[in-house]
Image (spheres, rainbow, N blue to C red):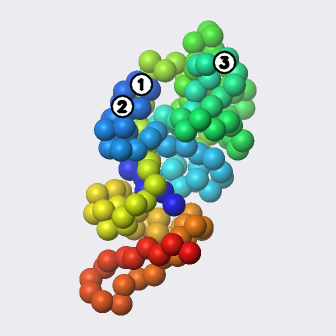
Amino acid sequence: MQCSRYLDESMKYASAVEKCKSLNAEVTTSKSQEENTFVVGLISSAVWLGLTDDVKEGEHIWVDGTPLDYSNWHDGEPNNWNNIQDCVELTTSGKWNNRNCENGYGVVCKRPVQDVKYCLDFWDKCRDMLVLKPSMCTDLRIRRSTVPTNMWNLQYL
Ligand SMILES: [Ca+2]
Ligand SMILES: [Ca+2]
């Protein structure tokens, strides 16, 4: 399960990577239709995906080192326009377009959930995700505390 936070600030890709690192997170991936829909639900304008082909042209690698499996490119993309497009923009329609890494977009940072209280206190949309996207939590069982307030507990299966 992951915890995600949308930063609606225009920045080049390298800055997005650094920004997420400063939050102990990574630029979001989108490895499934479900994750793509989830990330699109967080954003109000285009964001970077943690996906580049800067090592080998045309070979897109996720920021965590995994190869591209699921994708949702716009028609005609990735076109590597002018041979300078090694980064990938996720548009609000959910479609992807490769872009110059020096362009400016927002970013969604994500990280695994270690402590759900921390997540709920400091990260956007996690409560919504826990409630509305239980299938995102395949490796965790979540139960609501019977004791006070609105706290959640996580329990490893
Ligand atoms: Ca490229
Ligand atoms: Ca393109």
Residue 121: x and y, percent? Answer: 28, 63
| Upstream in sequence: badge 2 or badge 3 | 2
- Side (left or right) of 105 relative to 140: left
Residue located beneath label 2 in the image: 18
Amino acid identity at mark 2: Glu
Q: Nearer the viewer, residue 79 or 147?
A: 147
Q: CA distance from mark 3 to mark 1?
A: 18 Å
Amino acid identity at mark 3: Lys
Describe the element under mark 2 as helix, strand or loop: helix
Residue drawn at (51%, 72%) of the image: 156
Residue located beneath label 1 in the image: 14
Say which quarter of the image contains residue 73: top right
Whether residue 81 is visible, yes or no, is: yes
* Number of dots carrying numbers: 3
| Upstream in sequence: badge 3 or badge 1 | 1
Residue 79's disc number: none
Q: Nearer the viewer, residue 106 or 156?
A: 156
Describe the element under mark 1 as helix, strand or loop: helix
Residue drawn at (31%, 79%) of the image: 150
Amino acid identity at mark 1: Ala
